[in-house]
Image: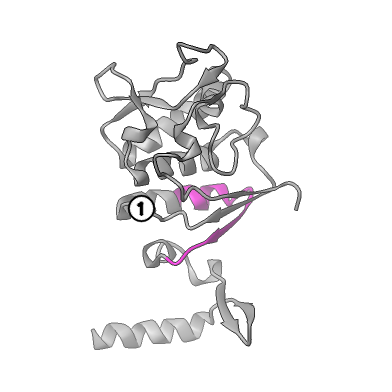
Amino acid sequence: MQSWRLYHFHDTSGSALVKQVHNLNDNEYLRDDARNLGAFLLRLKHHHGEHYDRIVKVIRLVAPFFGDFHLRPTVGNGEKIQVEWTEQGQDEPFPASSLSDGTLRFICLATVLLQPEAFMPAAILVDEPELGLHPFAINVLAGLMRSASQEHQLIVSTQSVELVNEFDADDLIVVDKRDGSSTFKRPDTQALSEWLLKTEALS
């Protein structure tokens, strides 16, 4: 379990660490709250260009206005960096704080799921990835998850109907609390199919 990594990008407030200046050399891996996103992306851009380009292209799918990241050391300190980006066809850089919460969270998720194999942990745990995401972004996210899960164990906790609908019943584990303890079980595929048919008939 020491090789597992848990990601939770719930904090996108003004004080969120992902929006702050951070050390340029903190780029060995993406931290669990993406506080070093700028440094990590800069490393990918310089040394893993194919993966970097793929991340940018996927971001543009859900945020067509997004042009590219504008990654550079800060003017006052060449050992620091912060996330900046530009709009399509423009060269004026904007800080991460000018992105919507959902767009910033999607950027973090896309970076996790599309990072080079060398940086991938043995298991990826993501808590509530759907927070603030547009339904289309959830659809794209589900595709990224399915792709990443071909080679890596991916454990996602969610309460999103939209995200659950993107997967088969065999992919799901339902967690209930009974007698003060959490119980885990997979849905009965046949019973679920019968219930869905009855629900469709009544609607």
- Is 167 placed above or below 70 here? below
Q: Residues within 10 Å of mark 1 (few under 14, many from 20)?
A: some
Residue 122 on image: x %, y % = 69, 47
Q: Is residue 148 magenta?
A: yes
Residue 67 on image: x %, y % = 32, 26
With 78 as the anchor, is 141 left or right in this view? left
Q: Residue furthest right?
A: 2
**Residue 135, quarter of the rendered image:** bottom left
Residue at 32% x, 42% y is: 100
Residue at 36% x, 45% y is: 101
> How many numbered discs sit on the rendered protein?
1
Residue 33 on image: x %, y % = 54, 43
Q: Which quadrant does the C terminus fall into? A: bottom left
Residue at 55% x, 31% y is: 36
Residue at 75% x, 53% y is: 1
With 15 as the anchor, is 134 left or right in this view? left
The magenta segment is 143-159
Q: Check disc 1 and report the residue beneath it.
A: 132
Q: Is residue 145 magenta?
A: yes
Which element carries disc 1, helix, strand or loop? Answer: loop
- Colour scheme of the picture: one colour
Residue closer to the observer: 171 or 19: 19
Residue closer to the observer: 72 or 69: 72
Q: Amino acid at mark 1?
A: Gly
With 82 as the anchor, is 150 left or right in this view? right
